[in-house]
Image (spheres, rainbow, N blue to C red):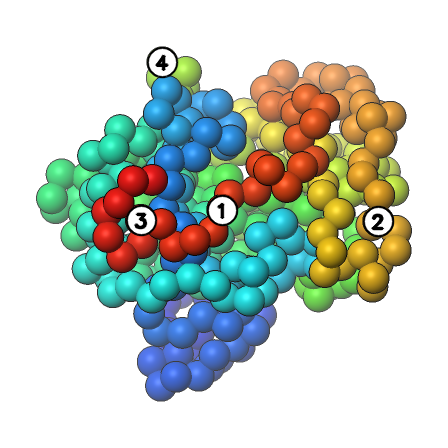
């Protein structure tokens, strides 16, 4: 699959717009990369953060735009600053110079061509961090294949098993089919995970956020992951659903937090299946204080991140 901004089909929505001519598809991204924050982030999975944190690059816009998104201003509103590919290269090198444990590309799908170009340039200048592709899971297999040799760790969500839920909350009724095919391709690219001194140097970590009232959907997701991959990938089970103001009016069922009992049922099922490699969250993570402050820090100048 040839990746092109001239007829953008990077994600399953396949809008076909010419971003080089100023057209914008579903995600809202243009020709230039837009970034909301460059930071050292301590709240990713431990095998990605190390001592100093993951070197996160939070990209603006999103191919999914989930109703309950914690980063609403960035994903839906497109907040951020535009940068050239040359500046993106500098950002990657700056994250390495700060001692980041990994380069964590957050919501990057709609900028894959620019990311590949920037990684090529950065590697020519000594860049060597593990590259993490942190995405919503709604991916084209061809776009993932294009990342062969560029991405070391894939960190996709697997949000929904039920297509009705995917349609309702993310306007993506074909989510499960695309996400599972993409995750299989990711595993094909990396193989079983590898840990070195507690840090993941290659592999797949699948994240799943348990939604209020939907733990049964979560159980089906665990069944699929274990049947397909056994213990050759990591799982990250999240309880951090936060009631965001933008979605509670339209979806009254999301006006509450996940209960301890709901989350425990999912954890118990993972244990029953024999899933050995699983990150879990403690109580108190469903709070807005854990959401990064998106203020453009580190985007146009190195700054303190």
Q: Are marks 3 and 4 in contact (CB under 8 Å)?
A: no
- Picture coordinates of residue 245, whole percent (x, y): 73, 56
Q: Label for residue 185? A: none
Whether residue 220 appears in this view of the structure is: no
- Picture coordinates of residue 191, whole percent (x, y): 44, 32
Residue at the disc numbered 4: 197
- Picture coordinates of residue 149, whole percent (x, y): 30, 44
Q: CA distance from mark 1 to mark 3?
A: 12 Å
Q: Are marks 1 and 4 in contact (CB under 8 Å)?
A: no
| Quarter residue 218 falls in | top right
Chain-order first, disc 1 or disc 4? 4
Residue 268, above or below 125: above
Q: Quadrant of the N terminus?
A: bottom left
Chain-order first, disc 3 or disc 2? 2
Q: Are marks 3 and 2 in contact (CB under 8 Å)?
A: no
Q: CA distance from mark 1 to mark 4?
A: 30 Å
Residue 115, above or below 232: below
Q: CA distance from mark 3 to mark 4?
A: 28 Å
Residue at the disc numbered 1: 293
In the displayed orientation, state which residue is furthest to the top.
Answer: 197
Q: Identify the residue shown where x is 83% and y is 62%.
A: 249
Chain-order first, disc 3 or disc 4? 4
State the SS at label 1. Answer: loop
Q: Label for residue 255? A: 2
Q: Are marks 1 and 2 in contact (CB under 8 Å)?
A: no
Q: CA distance from mark 4 to mark 2?
A: 41 Å
């Amino acid at each position: 699959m040839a990746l092109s901004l001239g007829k953008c089909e990077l994600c399953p929505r396949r809008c076909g717009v010419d971003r080089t001519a100023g057209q914008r598809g579903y995600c809202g991204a243009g020709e230039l990369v837009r970034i909301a924050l460059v930071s050292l982030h301590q709240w990713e999975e431990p095998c990605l953060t190390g001592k100093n944190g993951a070197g996160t690059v939070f990209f603006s816009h999103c191919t999914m735009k989930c109703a309950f998104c914690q980063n609403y201003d960035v994903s839906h509103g497109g907040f951020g600053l535009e940068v050239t590919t040359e500046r993106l290269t500098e950002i990657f090198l700056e994250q390495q110079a700060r001692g980041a444990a990994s380069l964590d590309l957050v919501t990057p799908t709609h900028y894959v061509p620019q990311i590949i170009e920037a990684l090529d340039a950065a590697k020519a200048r000594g860049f060597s961090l593990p590259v993490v592709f942190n995405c919503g899971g709604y991916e084209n297999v061809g776009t993932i294949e294009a990342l062969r040799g560029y991405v070391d760790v894939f960190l996709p969500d697997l949000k929904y098993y039920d297509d009705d839920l995917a349609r309702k909350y993310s306007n993506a009724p074909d989510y499960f089919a695309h996400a599972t095919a993409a995750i299989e391709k990711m595993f094909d690219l990396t193989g079983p995970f590898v840990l070195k001194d507690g840090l993941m140097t290659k592999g797949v970590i699948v994240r799943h956020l348990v939604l209020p009232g939907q733990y049964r959907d979560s159980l089906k997701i665990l069944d699929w992951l274990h049947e397909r991959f056994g213990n050759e990938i990591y799982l990250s089970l999240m309880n951090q659903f936060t009631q965001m103001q933008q979605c509670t009016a339209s979806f009254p069922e999301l006006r509450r937090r996940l209960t301890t009992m709901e989350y425990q049922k999912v954890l118990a099922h993972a244990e029953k299946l024999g899933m050995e490699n699983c990150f879990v969250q403690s109580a108190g993570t469903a709070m807005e204080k854990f959401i990064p402050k998106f203020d453009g820090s580190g985007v146009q100048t190195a700054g303190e991140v």
